[in-house]
Amino acid sequence: METPEQILDSLRDHVEWTETERDAAFDRMIQSADLDVLETVAVLRLGNLALADGDAVLRLIEAIGSEDVLTALGQALLGQSDLSADRDWHALSILSDAERLGEWPDLAERFAELEEIFEEADTSSLEEWAATMQDDPDGVWVALHGLSMVEPAIRPSIVASLANVPLNDGLIGFLEVLAGGPDQDLRRAAREVLERQDSSPTKRIQVASEAALTRPHTIDRCLVTGLDGEGRGVICIATNRGIARSAIFECDITRGIFSVVGEESLNQDWSQVLSLRPETEYLIDRPELTVSLLAGLVGIAGPDLPSHVTDWLDQLFGQVLTPHPFPGTIEGFDPATVHHGLLPSLAAEVVQACPTWIDQSSLTLELAKELTGKTYQSADPVRDAGAYRYLFEHRLVGRLETYRRMLYWTSAFWNAQERTELAQAALTFAWQLSDAQHSVPANPFVVELTTRSLNAAIGESSLSTPQ
């Protein structure tokens, strides 16, 4: 039987575990030893609560609740002022609930600062926020952007406070975007608000798509491509609102829509779009997907959306689309339930299905040359762990947000193709890259992408090496 120490080591080392798996491990730990043993183990682990086992240690401290263990917690927190807001709040709340916080004035001050941030989201400001979402076409995007500026630990409480605010259409749309999003705590908070207020079902509404598709116009043709390795793609659309118009939008997953070529015709030549991207897949006449991705790109660009793009969106749809995140759900599928043992094979399938997703940076080429110099014909994540970590820390970590968005787009694209298993796999890794604990060199998607990139560079290096 595992010891409590071994279980905590596993929680620390396996950051890729889902909440369900972590909860199961915690339950095993509680059952694995007597209370005195668990108390000793918990106290010994208080030295660094920032590690991935920190939450489990705090849950253990909270469950034990003895005077000695609470004293040890207070003393340990004095030397850990750089904890994340959510971890700090959890730890300080334990002392506050036990009425022990006053023994450490510095900790009480830290706790008061966190409380002050919570209190800023008072009911009156939330009511104003809700009214803005109802009256302003961009209100949902503004609210999502505003929420992203708040400490992650505080966001669920702000959303939960909306249970006291009368819901309107804009606020329901905002909550349903969150209810289908990648953040587990925000999903839970948004769904609870919606259920408490007896609003519509808690599956995510494609607000922008439905709004666009139900206006009095006809989408006659549309086309959307997959993304290349830099997160670029093309969306084409033709509508008839009394005047026939069509446009080719050039898109970038980090910039939004950056260019458009339009004309007053339903027969604009889109063949050049495909000829310039022979390795890129495309879908024809999937209007809901097409408009939803367009609206997601509008959200990425925000106020930086070029005026000529705005003009063409207005001509095609009658107004600029309401921004919202890329499609983040697949009906009946929860990425948090995917077993971690399946992730390596799923990552291989996703990367194999995206042949242009290769990091071609100079650093990747340099590392590949080093491996070639050792006569290695291919990269190995175990043998070459140092190279993998170096590439992650000096290159890939800065591109994880780009890949996260690429995975969301690709998941929606594959789902529209009815390639359900691939779509679910892509959504799983997009969801993981939304969480810092999974954004690590050992993440199976990161490992597979690194292997693909290094092997491509090794091949290029070998071709350029004189024989």
Image: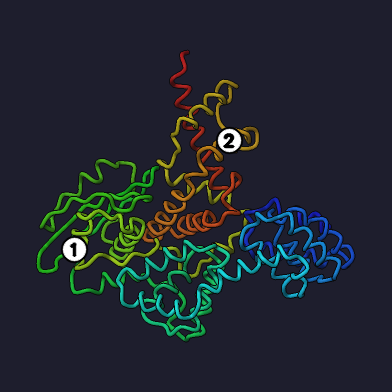
Residue 190 position within the rendered picture, expressed as x and y whole percent measured from the top left: 50, 74
Residue 7 is at least partly visible in this image: no
Residue shown at 41%/54% (left/top)? 410
Distance CA(mark 2)–CA(mark 1)? 47 Å
Residue 358 position within the rendered picture, expressed as x and y whole percent measured from the top left: 44, 39
Residue shown at 56%/49% (left/top)? 345
Determine crowd level at label 1: few under 14, some 14-19, many 20+ residues with C-alpha closer than 10 A: many
Side (left or right) of 292 relative to 180: left
- Which is nearer the eye, 359 or 92? 92
Looking at the image, is 301 positioned above or below residue 384?
below
The residue beneath circle 1 is: 316
Side (left or right) of 286 relative to 369: left
Q: Hey, what amino acid is under mark 2?
A: Tyr
Side (left or right) of 307 relative to 43: left
* Image quadrant containing the N terminus: bottom right
Residue 221 position within the rendered picture, expressed as x and y whole percent measured from the top left: 20, 60
Residue 57 position within the rendered picture, expressed as x and y whole percent measured from the top left: 75, 61
The residue beneath circle 2 is: 390
Can you name the residue that lies furthest to the front here? Answer: 105
Q: Hey, what amino acid is under mark 1?
A: Leu
Determine crowd level at label 2: few under 14, some 14-19, many 20+ residues with C-alpha closer than 10 A: some
Quadrant housing residue 143: bottom left
Side (left or right) of 298 relative to 198: left
- Which is nearer the eye, 293 or 140? 140
Can you name the residue that lies furthest to the top here? Answer: 467
Which of the two discs, 2 and 1, labels the residue nearer the N terminus? 1
Does dot 2 land on a helix, a strand or a loop? helix
Residue shown at 47%/69% (left/top)? 180
What colouring does the structure picture have? rainbow
